[in-house]
Amino acid sequence: MDGVGVMDEAAEFRAPDFTADLDVEGAIARCLPEATAKGMFLSACVELGRRAAPTRAEEIFTGVSARRWAPFLDYSLRDEMRLLVNSTRLRWPSEPVRERLRRMGWTAYPTFSESMAGRVILGMVSKDIASKFGLISKAFALSVSHLRISPRRIDDRHWQMDYEQTYCFLDSYHVGIIEGFVRAHGLVPDVKVRMKTEDSGTFDVRW
């Protein structure tokens, strides 16, 4: 979201606009060069693009510095951002870029929960969604560098989450991540956002 100023704490949350223009190159340029993500998420991007368009798989790697990633090692977050854009373009070519990134976000929780680290962390709590919400900041800390998330419970089916240094498409891809998390528990998510900058803000999450 271009031109976002200082957040007004009294401002209302709004539904994300997944049809709005997105400055992909500007978002990647804002991302710290040293920021990283776990290899399993980069590999998931490639797999989605390859399944969607096997004969065009080379396009997935445009602008990316590597082609193979170990699941639990750290790799360039900028590379993940490019892989997200490139692969979702092949998978959902008729959708706006923000909507494509949102849909890719739906796959992030299953990717993490099926990993060894995800099974260990999520196995520490009961299977209900409220118990797992409290572990979100830990899960993200293991998955992405620099990103800081502070979740807080408002009510039984209502949480808010403060995001800082969220370079990887906060109001599209990360909205999809939370939607996917809620949907994985058989619930219907309602996620609204209040942006502070392009890379920080607060989500209001209900189900």
Image (spheres, rainbow, N blue to C red):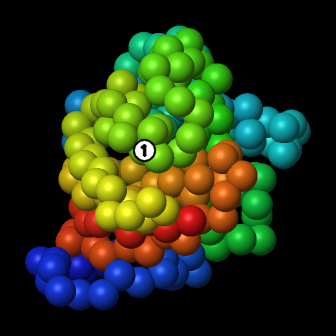
On the image, which quarter does residue 140 sit in?
top left
Residue 72 screen position, x and y as percent = 47, 14
Residue depicted at 23% across the width and 44% down the height: 148
| Quadrant of the drawing holding the N terminus | bottom left
Question: Is residue 23 something one can see in this rendering?
Answer: no
Outermost residue on the front side: it is 156
* Observer-nearest of 80 and 158: 158
Q: Is mark 1 on a helix, strand or loop?
A: helix
With respect to residue 188, does 69 lie above or below? above
On the image, which quarter does residue 159 sit in?
bottom left
Relative to 111, is 74 on the left or the right? left
* Observer-nearest of 159 and 48: 159
Outermost residue on the bottom side: it is 11
| Amino acid type for the residue under numbered disc 1 | Phe
Relative to 106, is 148 on the left or the right? left
Residue depicted at 50% across the width and 15% down the height: 120
Question: Is residue 175 something one can see in this rendering?
Answer: yes
Residue depicted at 46% across the width and 55% down the height: 174
Residue depicted at 65% across the width and 35% down the height: 110
With respect to residue 204, does 36 lie above or below? above
Residue behind mark 1:
133
Label 1 Cα crowd, 10 Å radius (few <14 / some 14-19 / many 20+):
some
The number of discs equals: 1
* Observer-nearest of 40 and 86: 40
Residue 130 screen position, x and y as percent = 47, 46
